[in-house]
Amino acid sequence: MSEARSNWVLWLIPLVILAIAGISFVVFWLTTKSNLHILTTPAGVSVSVNGGIVGVTADSGLVLAVEPGALELVLSRAGFEDAVSSHNVRRGELIQIEHLMKREGMVFVRGGRFRMGNNAGAYSEKPERDVTLDPYYIDTSEVTAKVYKEYDSSYRPAYTAAGLPATGIAWEEADAYCRSAGKRLPTEAEWERACAGPEALPYAYGNAYDATLGRTGSRVQDGPVPVGQYEAGNAGVVDMTGNVWEWCSDWHGRDTYRTSDTLNPAGPLRGDRHVIRGGAWYSNASFSRCTHRPGNFRSQRDPSFGFRCARDLD
């Protein structure tokens, strides 16, 4: 009898082990979820999973436990484009999601260190120096005459064809427009970084001057063209080489590069004229370089002066 009982116990042990394993599997299957780690730039983004808001991202991101399977993720924040993505997650899986939020009509520039200036250029472009910028956004295109007229109904552009950039804009008017839109004029360091890219190229489209890649080298009477007719340049923005000169926030100084900071430089504290950049439709190879910063213009309002706006990463 005792031998039969021993055999029965020996058979029972594996059955118990199998039962425990089965129960453990069922518990795992019923209780274990998938995890999402969501990082957004900037933070403060609302996260929705399958139609329900589940949290807001912090600087360190947002960690969520979700049911496995198909899910739709929506990232949203006022002033930014919604980001929608689909994912199929497995049970117990950890998925890292990093997303750069896009502002409508703007591109993100990562900033960092770049080489500013041109030792082979004009006096005011020297010396070349390493400048470091915080990340920022900049408008994809020059502000158009149509958009500016919606802001100021009294505006009478010199050029009226559809899609043309706003021209004949004084610095104060450009500054006021950008502020009204919750933006600001770019510093000339930000402008040059967006034009030249991290490799500090001479033109927004590359190393060599080419009037077929940007609106330059035309006659004065020809005027600008609608924004975006040429392919985007280094930062994913259009018309930074040519079309119209663009206002920057800085006062102009011939010796600025010899005296100013190299961390987020903002130019002199005072002056008698502000910086314009990028050349216009009539500019030659020299004047349309990303580094060129003329200081001899006489007027604060000119048919070839336009602008675009920038914005801090907030």
Image (cartoon, helix red, strand yellow):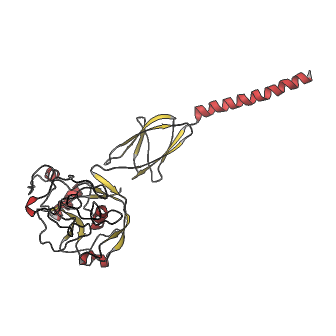
Q: Which of the 4 quarters of the picture holds residue 24?
A: top right
| 139 relative to 306 in the view: left or right | right
Q: Total marks drawn? A: 0
Residue 109 position in % (x across, y down): 34, 58
**Residue drawn at x 15%, y 56% as measured from the top left:** 166
- In the rendered view of the protein, which quadrant contains the C terminus? bottom left
To which quarter of the image does residue 282 belong? bottom left
Is residue 243 left or right of 138 when viewed as pictured? left
Residue 135 locus on image (x, y percent): 36, 60
Q: Residue 155: x and y, percent?
A: 10, 55
Please tell me which residue is depicted at 92% across the width and 20% down the height of the picture: 1
Instruction: Identify the residue shown where x is 29% and y is 77%.
Output: 126
- Outermost top residue: 1
Of 20 and 281, nearer the camera is: 281
User: Is residue 146 in view from this perspective?
Assistant: yes
In the displayed structure, does residue 305 sit left or right of residue 125? left
Camera-side residue of 140 and 212: 212
Q: Is residue 262 visible?
A: no
Nearer to the camera, 26 or 237: 237
User: Which x, y percent locates residue 251?
Assistant: 23, 71
Q: On the picture, is 282 further left or further right than 269?
A: left
